[in-house]
Image: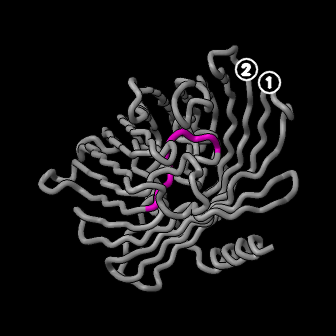
Amino acid sequence: MCRALVAAALITLVAARSDAQTAEQHQDPVPSGRSSDLVAHVFGSVDWFGAQHSNPPNSFALGQLALFVTASINDRVSVLAEVVIEASAADTEVTVDLERLQLTYRVNDFLNISAGRYHTGIGFYNAAFHHGSYFETAVGRPRIFKFEDEGGVLPIHEVGVSVRGKVPKTESTLHYVAEVGNGRRWANLEDNTVIDQNQAKSTNLGLAFRPPEWRGVEVGGSFYRDDIPLGLNTSVNHHILALYGVYRTPSTELMAEWLQLSFHEAGVLGTFDNRGGYVQVSQAFGKVRPYYRYDRLDIDPNTPFIGEYGSSLKHEIGVRFDPAAWVGIKTQYERLSENGGPGGNGAHVQLVFVF
């Protein structure tokens, strides 16, 4: 009952204070200098999916309802909040999660400091696409970038401090990100789920090259590290290397990413290396955009924490149709093979909208 009241209050707030929004605002708000400058929107979706060898064979489902709010406190300070509401079709139970909450202080173009809960700057996709599925071309995120509660293998969210900006004296071609956080909680060693589990902090460093003469092109990479407690007296050293190249314009999209996830348990010989990535292409023809995505994840079953998540290879071919502003329909064929087994066919239709 309490969660339902919270959800109703948030929707009322959004309905009362909504303005036009861009994909850039959905990622990082820029203070405007007006204390009353508040932007609020709701991102929703309705899905139908079916697949071979699944139970049930096909089903309708409600997607996430993402409430997104940004506000400028003054000309340098802004706030971003993203709350996700999910409802179970089986028992109508509603869950409310605070996915992002950031207070950002903008010193200048070279230094923007954010504190709170954020999407980590690992690679490209995680910082470019959030819980509003409207901005995504295909149905769903690449397997490597799935959210933690959906079987994801990355630290998608973290609580800490994130610093971003342009690299000085590079004519705005180089952009950096530096983050320090608690790290992802992989094992419940204690009852307190709010604070960090050990003295170590996760760090992430990223660099992106955006040549002004090639608008839409971005090439970059990031390196993430953390020490994850495996027990009371042992830990696992975790590294993530991400490399990517993208070309995105209003009509054309070409994205490719490769990541290596390494786990090394202290006092044990050998390192478990796991890899994943995707290639996605699309081209718009008016309101119609056909697309294709190659999506792969290779997991060593002996790897700590993620070994049981399994490997997968997926081909996705689809068409997105945008009949009106802030409304889209995605129709997608999928061919999925898991853990080296035979492939299975599937279909997914998703209605996405913003208000």
Residue marked by disc 2: 344
Task: Tell me the quarter of the picture where residue 222 sits.
Answer: top left
The amino acid type found where label 2 is placed reads Gly
Quarter holding the N terminus is bottom right
Residue reaching furthest to the bottom: 35
Find numbered disc 1 in the image and state the secondary structure of the residue it sits on.
Answer: loop
Q: Residues within 10 Å of mark 2 (few under 14, many from 20)?
A: some
In this rendering, the answer to whether 322 lies above or below 199 is above
Residue reaching furthest to the left: 169
Residue 322 appears anywhere in the view? yes
Task: Tell me the quarter of the picture where residue 14 sits.
Answer: bottom right
Determine whether label 1 and label 2 are within 8 Å by CB: yes
Spot occupied by residue 250 in the image (x, y as percentages of width and height): 45, 46
The amino acid type found where label 1 is placed reads Gln
What residue lies at 47% left-to-right and 41% top-to-bottom?
251
What residue lies at 84% left-to-right and 35% top-to-bottom?
58
Q: Is residue 3 left or right of residue 230?
A: right
Spot occupied by residue 37 in the image (x, y as percentages of width and height): 46, 80
Residue marked by disc 1: 52
Spot occupied by residue 15 in the image (x, y as percentages of width and height): 66, 75
